[in-house]
């Protein structure tokens, strides 16, 4: 383990059309965390809505979800490698009944 992070996300701002229902019946939401070397207001983690390649190329503004901070690190962060033997196919975005969600 190289780092521990604390992140707070505003779940009321999640666009419900981006919820993904997996084959297991669970509901997922893709987002991106950016860890910066410099801190602003005591936070150095930025959470935002995951973007498609087309959205990035079109320079679509990022939808901010929240922020946080690294509160412990051994100074050694390595890139995770995908294990194809364990990888599951990604579920397609589908309409999700959000009536049971708390927001």
Image: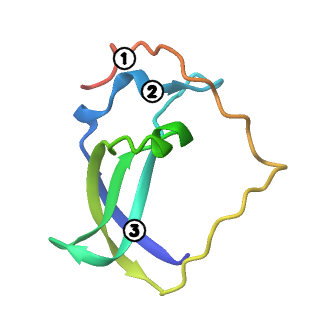
In this rendering, would 83 be left or right of 49? right
Per the model, the C-alpha gap separating discs 3 and 2 is: 24 Å
Marked residue nearer the N-terminal end (1 or 3): 3
Whether residues under marks 3 and 2 lie with C-beta atoms below 8 angstroms apart, the answer is no
Q: Secondary structure at mark 1?
A: loop
Q: Is residue 16 left or right of residue 13?
A: right
Q: Are marks 1 and 2 in contact (CB under 8 Å)?
A: yes
The image shows residue 82 at horizontal and vertical percentages of 73, 57
- Residue at the (41%, 57%) spot, across then down: 33
Q: Tell me if residue 63 comes above or below residue 3 in the rendering.
A: above
Residue 95's place in the image compared with 79, above or below, is above
Q: How many marks?
A: 3
Q: Which quadrant of the rendered structure holds the N terminus?
A: bottom right
Residue located beneath label 2 in the image: 19
Looking at the image, which residue is at 54% across and 84% down? Answer: 76
- Report how far apart the C-alphas of labels 1 and 2 lie in the structure: 9 Å
Residue under circle 1?
Answer: 98
Of badges 1 and 3, the one in the foreground is 3
Seen in the image, is 16 located left or right of residue 28?
A: left
The answer to which of marks 1 and 2 sits earlier in the sequence is: 2
Q: Which mark is residue 35?
A: 3
Q: Nearer the viewer, mark 1 or mark 2?
A: 2
Measured Cα–Cα span from mark 1 to mark 3: 30 Å
**Neighbours of disc 3 within 10 Å: few (<14), some (14-19), many (20+):** some
Mark sitting earlier along the chain (3/2)? 2
Instruction: Pinpoint residue 68: horizontal percent, then vertical percent.
Output: 28, 62
């Amino acid at each position: 383990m190289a780092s521990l992070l604390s992140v707070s996300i505003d779940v009321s701002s999640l666009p419900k059309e981006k919820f993904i229902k997996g084959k297991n019946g669970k509901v997922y939401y893709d987002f991106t965390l950016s860890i910066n070397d410099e801190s602003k207001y005591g936070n150095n983690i930025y959470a935002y809505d995951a973007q498609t390649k087309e959205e990035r190329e079109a320079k679509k503004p990022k939808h901010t979800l929240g922020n946080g901070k690294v509160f412990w690190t051994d100074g050694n962060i390595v890139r995770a490698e995908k294990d194809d033997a364990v990888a599951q196919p990604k579920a397609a975005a589908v309409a999700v009944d959000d009536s049971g969600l708390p927001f």
